[in-house]
Amino acid sequence: MNLSLKRRIAASFAFANVMVLLIGFTVFYYLNSLNKQIVSITSNTNQISLLTDEIRISAVSILKMQKKILTQSAKEKDLDNLNALLNSFHSQLKNLDDFYTEVQIKSIISKMIGYVDALKTLLSKVSLKNTRDNGGVSAIGELADKILEAFSEFQDIQYYQNVKRDKELEDIIGDTRRYMLIVLIITFLFTILLSLVIPGKIALPFKKINDAVRELQDCNFDVSIYYDQDDEIGELARELNKMIFSMKNFEELRTDRISVEHRKFDILANMIKKNVLIANAQGELIYLNNKLYTTLNLDTDSVLNKNINDTRIPESIKAAYDLALKRRSKIENAEISIKEVKKYDEVNEETGETEHREEEEVVFEGYANVIPIRAKESSLDYYLMVISSEAFS
């Protein structure tokens, strides 16, 4: 499907917007994922810390009550208070156990729960009086000490768990940063690729048109613009190809016309019995008729399209031409003298040696009229020179 240039540019912008949205959503996804993980870990940590503090307070309370029971000042009500503390401690341990999946920690919590259950069972079977008589006080103290030892062990493990949790947070943040950096790098490279491809695709047909126009400026009509897209540029390319074809036909017709006119002028110039010369404003010889070629004893290649000063044209003709060029006006009856250098050998009578001599011989004397042929610009003027042996009237 061929899209117009307007739609292609709109599609490029739309694609760029989609890429920006995609990048934004990707970054948001990673940030949101990071936030959820941090919130989850922080929430669990806060709840565990809160439960740990409650358990620590309960453990201290149990320790105080256990010490009080070991003294003689304890009452039956203190056993009830200790039992209530144990119930609360048991519930706290159960809640704490739900937050952990590690076998080692769950094993310690289970051990503390077992000690608490054993202590509760012991308290439910004896009274304060009986415990002092049958050694129940010492059993209560031993169980309380075991609970405290297990709790201390739990705190040690929890410390390492906190270190592990901090390391996990660092890893999560590092992974998220790395993923975001990878996404940004890929997006940056993809954007650079698009910035190189899309403008090139859009600018390529304009470059073809520009190259074709430059060829036309050099009068080269053997060019065409190949562009197969059915859009505004394709329509412009087709119209330009039609124009180039028309210009090529016109140039061929113009060339043919000039050739015909040149042949007509050549016939007319050769029909008259006068020497004819044409040069442009830059001093380049454009035309000599056959009579002048014969008079000057020159050939076409030695004079045509060359500056008059770089040829063997006689100085009198050059002077007449230079005067017309300076004045940019008609020159009438300028004297012309055409001389020819003849070489011959002569024997010296005294020495008997052969000597080579040169002698100028006048082959033509006459007059020249220079007629300027005006153009829109002086640099495009032509100068027609007619040379005759008789003065022009």
Image: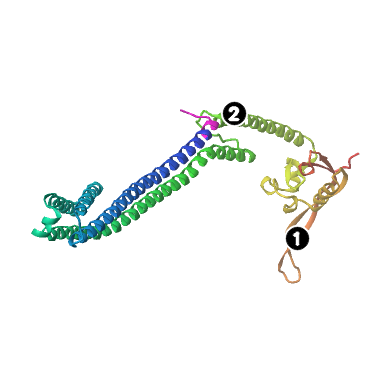
- Choose between 83 and 97: the one closer to the eye: 83
Disc 2: which residue: 239
Q: Is residue 371 above or below residue 106?
A: above
Q: Residue furthest bottom?
A: 351
Residue at 15% over, 52% down: 123
Q: Where residue 169 appears, x then y in whole percent?
A: 34, 53
Give the amino acid at mark 1.
Answer: Glu
- Choose between 151 and 90: the one closer to the eye: 90
Gap between marks 1 and 2, in whole Å? 67 Å
Please state the total of marks drawn on the protein image.
2
Give the amino acid at mark 2.
Answer: Glu
Disc 1: which residue: 358
Q: Where residue 256 appears, x then y in whole percent?
A: 66, 31
Q: Classify mark 2: residues with Cα within 10 Å, few (<14), some (14-19) or many (20+).
A: few
Residue at 75% over, 56% down: 342
Say whether residue 331 is visible: yes
Q: Where residue 276 appears, x then y in whole percent?
A: 78, 41
Q: Residue furthest left?
A: 134
Secondary structure at badge 1 equals: strand
Q: Report if residue 64 lies within the magenta region.
A: no
Q: Where residue 27 appears, x then y in whole percent?
A: 42, 45
- Magenta stretch, residue numbers: 1-8
| Image quarter of residue 170 | bottom left
Direction from residue 192 to residue 310 in the image, left or right? right
